[in-house]
Image: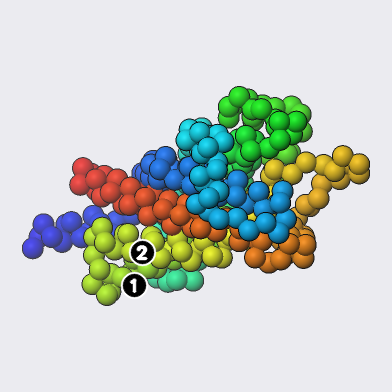
């Protein structure tokens, strides 16, 4: 009985900050290695709808054509930026959430509203930190699909980041930060907070262990995919846009303006072009990341 009480106490004891951040980052990288090809397809499919307004794109035929054009390894374009993004974004997003939640728990009961507030704040801060990686990821993932005359021909994530800073200025990294930060706040609220809440809900229903993690993370991934897709579309378009050759002005200037412009010109459903691969990415990465994080933190508690 005593040993059971000790294990329960250790399981409920807040983790050190470095453990929360490092396990979140490693879990994010683990999930991203498997999900990156799907993310590449989601970005390219979403941006293809921008280049071909009104076109109806089928995920499987689009994926097949992409592999024929760029090869299977072309789906891993931008993997370096994707991993760097996880190092900064995943570690700070879920790491900050755990730290904020556990700190708040010292002063009051942590309910769903508290989880939402902590997760939203953590998501926004993580997005600002990782904006340069996000912009580089979008550019690298989509460059090969452009017409030869339009390609930037980046050699890798470092070359991409250096050229953006030199050619467009450092502020270009945060050009699409508004939709990215907005989306990250929504991701925090709809993925991290709901995952934490679903764990409690499924636990009360008798779903325990790994089954609880998978069920909770899959449900959270579905919820946040539906809510954040329009902001993902806006972020992709703002990050990849070029100035009009005649006026020199950028077509997309802000989150709501981008969403309104796309919905007005192409219809609201255009904001959901590429939803299936986006959901595969969101749901798949959510399950893989949280599963890895839970296993790593479980291992730490056993060794502590």
Q: What residue lies at 55% left-to-right and 41% top-to-bottom?
A: 66
Q: Up-down: is 214 above or below 144?
A: below
Q: Nearer the viewer, residue 206 or 66?
A: 66
Q: Nearer the viewer, residue 270 or 133?
A: 270
Q: Is residue 235 left or right of residue 279?
A: right
Alpha carbons under labels 2 and 1: distance apart: 9 Å
Quadrant in which residue 105 is drawn: bottom left
Q: On the image, numbered disc 1 is attached to which residue?
A: 201
Q: Nearer the viewer, residue 60 or 226?
A: 60
Q: What residue lies at 46% left-to-right and 54% top-to-bottom?
A: 280
* Residue 104 visible in the displayed image: no
Q: On the image, numbered disc 2 is attached to which residue?
A: 216
Task: Give coordinates of residue 171: x percent, y percent.
Answer: 74, 39
Q: What residue lies at 53% left-to-right and 53% top-to-bottom?
A: 59
State the residue lying farthest toward the right: 247
Q: Up-down: is 158 above or below 110?
A: above
Quadrant in which residue 287 is drawn: bottom left
Q: Up-down: is 38 above or below 141?
A: below
* Residue 233 visible in the displayed image: yes
**Residue 126, numbered circle:** none
Task: Give coordinates of residue 133: x percent, y percent.
Answer: 58, 38
Mark 2 in CB contact with mark 1 (< 8 angstroms): yes
Q: N-terminal of the two: label 2 or label 1? A: 1
């Amino acid at each position: 009985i005593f040993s059971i009480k000790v294990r329960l106490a250790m399981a409920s004891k807040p983790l050190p900050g470095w453990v929360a951040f490092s396990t979140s980052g490693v879990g994010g990288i683990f999930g991203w290695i498997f999900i990156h090809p799907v993310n590449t397809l989601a970005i390219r499919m979403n941006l293809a709808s921008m280049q071909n307004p009104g076109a109806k794109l089928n995920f499987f035929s689009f994926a097949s054509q992409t592999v024929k054009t760029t090869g299977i390894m072309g789906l891993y374009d931008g993997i370096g930026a994707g991993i760097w993004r996880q190092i900064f974004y995943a570690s700070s997003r879920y790491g900050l959430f755990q730290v904020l939640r556990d700190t708040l728990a010292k002063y009051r009961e942590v309910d769903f509203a508290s989880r939402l507030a902590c997760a939203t704040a953590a998501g926004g801060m993580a997005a600002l930190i990782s904006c340069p990686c996000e912009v580089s990821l979008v550019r690298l993932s989509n460059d090969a699909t452009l017409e030869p005359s339009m390609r930037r021909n980046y050699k890798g994530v470092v070359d991409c980041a250096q050229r953006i800073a030199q050619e467009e200025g450092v502020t270009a990294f945060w050009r699409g930060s508004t939709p990215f930060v907005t989306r990250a706040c929504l991701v925090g609220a709809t993925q991290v907070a709901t995952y934490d809440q679903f764990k409690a809900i499924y636990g009360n229903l008798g779903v325990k262990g790994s089954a609880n993690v998978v069920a909770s993370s899959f449900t959270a991934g579905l919820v946040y995919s539906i809510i954040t897709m329009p902001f993902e579309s806006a972020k992709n378009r703002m990050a990849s846009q070029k100035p009009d050759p005649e006026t020199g002005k950028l077509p997309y200037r802000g989150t709501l303006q981008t969403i309104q412009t796309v919905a007005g010109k192409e219809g609201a459903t255009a904001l959901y072009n590429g939803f299936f691969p986006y959901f595969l990415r969101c749901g798949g990465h959510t399950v893989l990341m949280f599963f890895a994080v839970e296993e790593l933190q479980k291992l730490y508690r056993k060794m502590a």
